[in-house]
Image: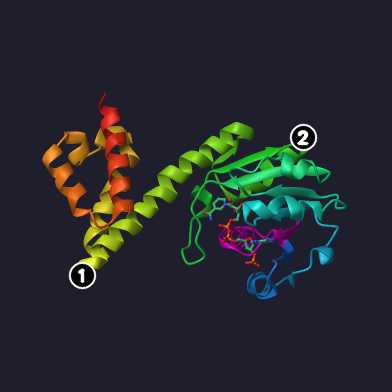
Amino acid sequence: MKIVLLGSGNVATHLAQALKSKDEEIVQIYSQRLNHAQLLADFIQCESVNDLKAIKTDADLYIIAVKDDAIESIADQLRTVNGLVVHTSGTTDIQALSSKVKRAGVLYPLQTFSKTKAVSFEEIPLCIEATNASDLSVLQNLASKLSQKVHHLGGEKRKLLHLAAVFACNFTNHMYTLAHQLLQQNDLDFEIIRPLIKETADKVMVNLPEKVQTGPAVRADETTLNKHFSMLNNMPELQHIYQTLSDSIKLMLK
Ligand SMILES: NC(=O)c1ccc[n+]([C@@H]2O[C@H](COP(=O)([O-])OP(=O)(O)OC[C@H]3O[C@@H](n4cnc5c(N)ncnc54)[C@H](OP(=O)(O)O)[C@@H]3O)[C@@H](O)[C@H]2O)c1
């Protein structure tokens, strides 16, 4: 299958590596910044472009892996292609593509990707969607080469999955960042908290999270909660987050 990859960020980079490892033929990488396209194209050994007018028109599959807000305008430039055009976004409607191109689909990988960290693609749930059965089967074939976990999951369910993922991953990671800041301000190394982070994640691999919640809010330890609150007097934003999350934990007790 001849594939054009549009994007050179975290997802495009991991997808390119996974597709290459399965001997899929990536014929071109597009990115708005040519040096970004070139970097990935050098690894894949294919052509790089930063002009949408230079996109090859005879590919079988076009994978748009750019920031969500740019998907629709890129699809608009692909109106003339006959190949299947998919995006990799959790929350973008398939209509962002189907309103522009002849054949539209979604290939949403439910994982957090950073260029700096390798991932095992075979373990990643891939959520696929297409506007017709034959394109869904094209995506099913490709996705099942990349991963053992392929789900036909479209529309509202995919968006809900992405929303849950923002809570489970993005917000959790932000909490690590806030913890890091608190530690750093007090000359403590982030390393000291890593075993706690690992154990917290390990526990939810075998338990439901609400069953293994610990800490002052779940114990209703008001003295400790109040002490923490006053320790954050000079950091009103953190104080607000602390209060909101503690209240949310307490609500689960009811
Ligand atoms: N990262 C994740 O964990 C993850 C997981 C699942 C799905 N996704 C989805 O995958 C897609 C890509 O996410 P990402 O994390 O890989 O993004 P990213 O690493 O931030 O890379 C963003 C990409 O978008 C391009 N871009 C930015 N603004 C653009 C514009 N105005 N016009 C054209 N291209 C533009 C950038 O091109 P230049 O570098 O050339 O500027 C770059 O290739 C998104 O739809 C996202 O929702 C991400």
From the image, tell me which residue sits under label 1: 187
Q: Specify the label residue 201 is tagged with.
A: none
- In the rendered view, does 73 fall on the left or right side of 232? right
Q: Mark 2 or mark 1, which is nearer the start of the sequence?
A: 2
Query: What is the x, y in percent for residue 70?
Result: 68, 55
Label 2 within 8 A of ligand 1 by Cβ = no
The image quadrant of residue 55 is: bottom right
Q: Nearer the viewer, mark 1 or mark 2?
A: 1
Quarter containing the C terminus: top left
Residue found at x 29% / y 29%? 251
Residue nearest the observer in this picture, 244 or 114: 244
* 123 lies left or right of 196: right
Kind of residue sitting beneath label 1: Asp
Magenta segment? 1-25
Kind of residue indicated by mark 2: Asn
Viewer-nearest residue: 142 or 210:
210
> Badge 2: how crowded within 10 Å, few (<14), some, or many (20+)?
few
Which residue in the structure is indicated by mark 2?
A: 132
Q: Say which quarter of the image contains residue 77.
A: bottom right
The residue that appears at 52% across and 65% down in the rendered structure is 115
Q: Position of residue 226 (x, y in %)?
A: 16, 43
Q: Is residue 26 above or below residue 35?
A: above
Q: Position of residue 156 (x, y in %)?
A: 60, 32
Q: Residue 53 is drawn in which quadrant? A: bottom right
Determine if the magenta segment contains residue 225.
no
Location of residue 185 in the rendering, given as x and y in whole percent from the top left corner:
24, 67
- Farthest residue, direction left: 223
Find ligand 1 in the image and state its quadrant. Answer: bottom right
